[in-house]
Amino acid sequence: MSAFALFAVAGFAAAYVGPLSASMTPPATAAELEPVSLYAHTVDDAQSFIAASGADLSLGREGMVYSVYVAPKPTPTPTPTEKGDSASSGGAVWAPPFVTPDPGTAQAIAYSMVQANGWGDDQFACLVALWNKESGWRVNAYNKGSGAYGIPQALPGNKMASAGADWETNPATQIAWGLGYVGGRYGTPCGAWGHSQAKGWY
């Protein structure tokens, strides 16, 4: 039995040694192998597929028109300049002259004029509040929206020329005109102040 086993093992070994020895032969050199390109095979396969299917896979740009849109730059709008008052210079827009405001002096002038009119301190207090609201007691205060000018905000400003030719720059001239307007229309500075509080203007 052991002889048979020995014989079987020898035969089994002989059966595997032949293929094993054949596989152990040295590999062929690189020069003996034909170069293979995966890319080339892929391209060939794709071209064969397209040719066999008859599909038209062109990009189809023939005859197409392309346009590029460029946003235009905005045209600058010119800013109008103001020149002179239409009421005083025949059509041009009037601009107030530069005058360094001196509210303390203007109020001192107004106080003496209020007393000269026979009005008391209460009336002066109403006048101070009124013209604080209107112009801040600035002799060159100018409202571009309405055209009102000066301490009393005369509309238009050249109305004050009836009180003096220096109406553009002299606080005394503006105050004299303003007190005449207030007294003639509302009776007293407090009457003008009450109307301003109720209506927003006087």
Image (tube, helix red, strand yellow):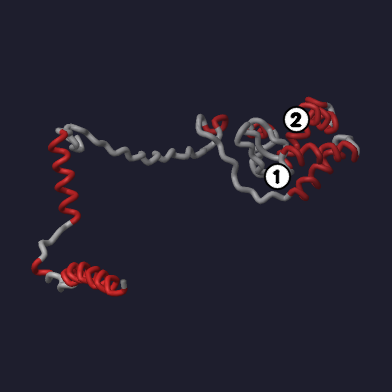
Residue at screen point 12% across, 61% down:
35
The picture places residue 22, in percent across and down from the top left corner, at: 16, 69
How far is mark 2 from mark 1, CA to CA? Answer: 19 Å
Instruction: Please name whichever residue, 127 or 29, is drawn nearer the observer in this view of the structure.
Output: 29
In the picture, measured across the screen, residue 46 lies left or right of residue 130, that is left
- Res. 38 image quadrant: bottom left
Position of residue 50 measured from the top left corner of the image (x, y, whole percent)? 16, 38
Which residue occupies the foreground of this view, 155 or 184? 155
- Circle 1 residue: 138
Residue extending farthest top: 185
**Closest to the observer: 45 or 98?**
45
The furthest residue to the front: 1
Q: Position of residue 136 (x, y in %)?
A: 73, 43
State left or right for residue 186 relative to residue 2. Answer: right
Q: How many marks?
A: 2
Q: Earlier in the sequence, mark 2 or mark 1?
A: 1
Write the residue at 18% across / 44% down.
46
> Would you place residue 193 above or below residue 139 in this image?
above
* Residue ID at (17%, 69%): 18
Quarter containing the N terminus = bottom left
Q: Amino acid at mark 1?
A: Arg
Whether residue 176 sits left or right of residue 89 in the image: it is right
Toward which corner of the image does residue 188 lie, by quadrant?
top right
Determine the residue located farthest toward the left in the rendered image: 32
Q: Is residue 10 above or below residue 117?
A: below
Say which amino acid is labelled 2. Gly
Percent across and percent down for residue 55 are 17, 33
The disc placed on residue 200 is 2
Label 1 sits on a secondary structure element that is: loop
- Image-based side of 111 in relation to 166, left or right: right
| Element carrying mark 2 | loop
